[in-house]
Structures are given as C-alpha cells and as structure tokens.
Image: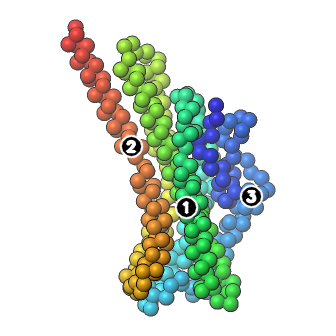
Amino acid sequence: MNLKLVHFLHHQRYLGLTDLAFSDSLQNYCLHATWTSIATQILVVGLFASSLVAAAVDSLYYMDTNSQTGNAFDRAVILTASVSQLLANLWFRSQQDSQVILLQRLSKLVGRLHCESLVMCSPRWLYCIWLVVSVLYGSMVAHFGMNWIEDMQLSRLLTLLGFVARCILANFQYTCYTSMVLVLQRLLRIQAEQLEGLVSSASISAADLAACLRAHDEILLLGQRELVAVYGGVVLFLLLYQVMQCVLILYVSNLEGFHSVQELVFILIWLAPMVFYLSLPLVANEVLKQCHRFRWNIKCEASSRYLRSIYLS
C-alpha cells in the first residue's frame, strides 16, 4: 500500500523550504538533509536577504503613483515581500519536525482506515494550478522587468528576483497547506462513512465503534494542533503581504484609471492568482464544519435507531 499522501510535498526540499523526504522502502515520511538541500536553503535565504538589502538601500518602487503616499506604500510592499517570505520560510523550517509527525500519523490513519483510494484523490490539480501560475507570473515579470530594470542595475535585478521567488514559494506553501486540509477532509469523510455503516448495522461491535470514534478524535486533533503548528505562522505572514499587494494594485488602478482594454486585462490577469491564493485557505478549511455535520448525522441516526427499537419493543 502506497502511503504517500500528497505526491508533491517532498518538492519542498528542491525549493529550499525543508528537508522533507519520503522513503519508498519504508513507506514513511522523514527528514533527510543533503548538501544539495542545505545549499538550496542557503541560496534562497541569501536571495531574499539580498533583495531586502537592495530595496532598503535604494529608494525603489514598482509603480510611480504620482503621490508621496502611494510611492511610500509601494516601497513598503517591496520591503515586506522579502521580510514576510523570510519569516514564513523560517517558521516552516522550524516546524519541519512537527510536519513529519503530522504526515506519519496521517499515514498510519490511512492504513488503519484502509483508504487505498486516498492517494488517487490527492489534490494534484492544486499542483497543476501552481505550475501554471508560476509560469504566468514568470512571463509577466520578465516583460515588466525589461522596462523596470535600467542599465541592468544590480539593486533592481535583486529586488525583481526576490519578488519572483516570493511568488513561487508563497503559492507553493499555500498549495501545501490546502492539500493537507483536503487530506484531512477526505479522511473525515471516509471515517464518517465507516462509522455510519457501523451505527446502521444490525449488530454493533463495541471494539470497532471505539476504534472508529478514536480515529475521528485523532483526525480532529491533528487538524487543530499539528496542522496549525506547522502552517499557522506561514499562512499568517503570507496573507499579510498578499493583502498589501492587492491593496496596492487596486489603489494604483483606481488612481490612474484604465487607458485601454489591454491594460485592464493585464491587471485582472495579475490580480486573479493573488485573490485565488488569498481566498484558498479560507475556502478550503471546512474541517470543523464537516466535523459538526458528521456529529449531527450520527446523533440523528442514533436517535432514529433508538426510537425504532422502542417502537418495535
């Protein structure tokens, strides 16, 4: 049985986030640091630190808003890009042990609940969206950089590279968090179906019922404790910057207006992925709502069965 919950989680090591790996022989998640992963992490930290220094030393802003307040906010967005991503990466790196514990316990639950189909239902579509958005932003930033970088200034080049890296890493972290939430929801749904089958059966095994309820509580605790510990700070730092960036784009668009349909389409294409990833964690996180719905269904089933037994007796 393949217990790899999400196939692209181990790509964190290639992006300089963590040392997470998956052992095919042991069928388990682990931390495996190599010289390549360590060098990648140092390179990523160095890029964001250089981008922060370049933006702080030189008075840079992406768009000339023709106002002192707008330019100051634009400069704050540039500085916050590197700071927010550095903090998010530091949080993610410091919680990699908790992430391994979370994945190992989820893998055990998959084996205990016999969810062989869970791997086939892993959220690969989120990974595909991340790839498309990364290519889209890369092409748009390349087009924008030709006009923004004058005489290949080192400060502007580093700032632009830091911005591109932030888009790629931040969206990937959003993707990882949402994928883990979807895995928890899938496990809750499977566990709920098994428990409903036990409750509606003619004979109920106390041991099976206790094991099923214990699995339900374990899934809920993983969502409220380990998942929050691993991704709580990451999502917080990324959301703060994402909101600032959306506000800046809306401010500049409202200030200058739209001079052509092409400009309007370009702004919408630039803004759509930001809004998507800004709302993705909020839309996907329905674990508690699903848990409450499950408990209500079980109570209704148990009450119906109890009333039916009284009527038959």
Q: Residues within 10 Å of mark 1 (few under 14, many from 20)?
A: many
Of the two numbered discs 1 and 2 in the rendering, the one whose residue sits closer to the viewer: 1
Under mark 3, the amino acid is Ile
- Picture quadrant where residue 288 is located: top left
Under mark 2, the amino acid is Leu
User: How far apart are the two marked residues, 2 and 3, measured between alpha carbons?
Assistant: 37 Å
N-terminal label among 1 and 2 = 1
Q: Pinpoint residue 151: horizontal percent, then vertical percent.
A: 68, 90
Q: Residue furthest left?
A: 311
Q: Is residue 253 above or below residue 101?
A: below
- Picture quadrant where residue 197 is located: top left
Q: Pinpoint residue 294: horizontal percent, then vertical percent.
A: 36, 34
Q: Residues within 10 Å of mark 2 (few under 14, many from 20)?
A: few
Q: Which residue is mark 3?
A: 38
Determine the secondary structure under disc 3.
helix
Residue occupying the point 68% across, 59% down: 16
Could one spot residue 121 in this view of the protein? Answer: yes
User: How far apart are the two marked residues, 1 and 2, measured between alpha carbons?
Assistant: 24 Å
Determine the secondary structure under disc 2.
helix
Which circle marks residue 171 in the picture? 1
Residue occupying the point 69% across, 54% down: 13
Q: Residues within 10 Å of mark 3 (few under 14, many from 20)?
A: some
Quadrant of the image for the C terminus? top left
Depth check: give the residue in front, 187 or 98.
187
Determine the secondary structure under disc 1.
helix
145 vs 186, left or right, is right
N-terminal label among 2 and 3 = 3
Residue occupying the point 55% across, 64% down: 133
Which circle marks residue 288 in the picture? 2
